[in-house]
Image (spheres, helix red, strand yellow):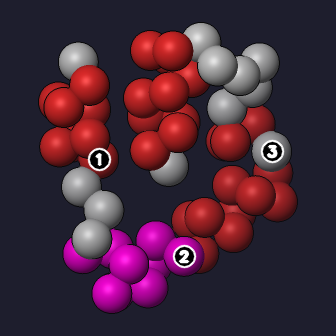
Amino acid sequence: MQFNAVYVGHFKCNRQRIADYKNISHYLKTLYKVPSIKKMVDLGHIRTHYY
């Protein structure tokens, strides 16, 4: 998710976002529902750090 939130827009390092890949995107959304993973991911902080 960090890749989507920062790297694609900021570094222009890929042609597509992870969200554009249906299966990978679905898998990541499933992972982020796991409480121990969800509490470790702070997209607001990630975006603020890079921008």
- The part of the image, by quadrant, that contains residue 42 is bottom left
Mark 3: which secondary structure?
Answer: loop
Mark 2: which secondary structure?
Answer: helix
| Residue receiving disc 1 | 43
User: Magenta segment: does it hold 8?
Assistant: no
- Label 1 neighbourhood size at 10 Å, few (<14), some (14-19), many (20+)? few
| Image location of residue 20, percent across then percent down | 75, 36
- The part of the image, by quadrant, that contains residue 14 is top right
Q: Tag 3 or tag 2, which sits nearer the N-term?
A: 3
| Residue receiving disc 2 | 31
Kindly check if marks 1 and 3 are in contact, taking CB atoms under 8 A apart as contact. Answer: no
| Residue receiving disc 3 | 21
The Cα–Cα distance between marks 2 and 1, rounded to whole angstroms, is: 15 Å
- Label 2 neighbourhood size at 10 Å, few (<14), some (14-19), many (20+)? few
Taking 49 as reference, is 21 above or below it?
A: below
Kindly check if marks 2 and 3 are in contact, taking CB atoms under 8 A apart as contact. Answer: no
At label 1, the amino acid type is Leu
| Image location of residue 15, percent across then percent down | 77, 18
At label 2, the amino acid type is Leu
The Cα–Cα distance between marks 1 and 3, rounded to whole angstroms, is: 20 Å
| Image location of residue 47, percent across then percent down | 26, 32
Magenta span dominant secondary structure: helix
In the image, the segment drawn in magenta is 31-39
For image coordinates 53% across by 36% down, the residue present is 4
For image coordinates 44% across by 44% down, the residue present is 2
Is residue 16 rendered to the left or right of residue 30? right
At label 3, the amino acid type is Tyr
Mark 1: which secondary structure?
Answer: helix
Taking 11 as reference, is 30 above or below it?
A: below
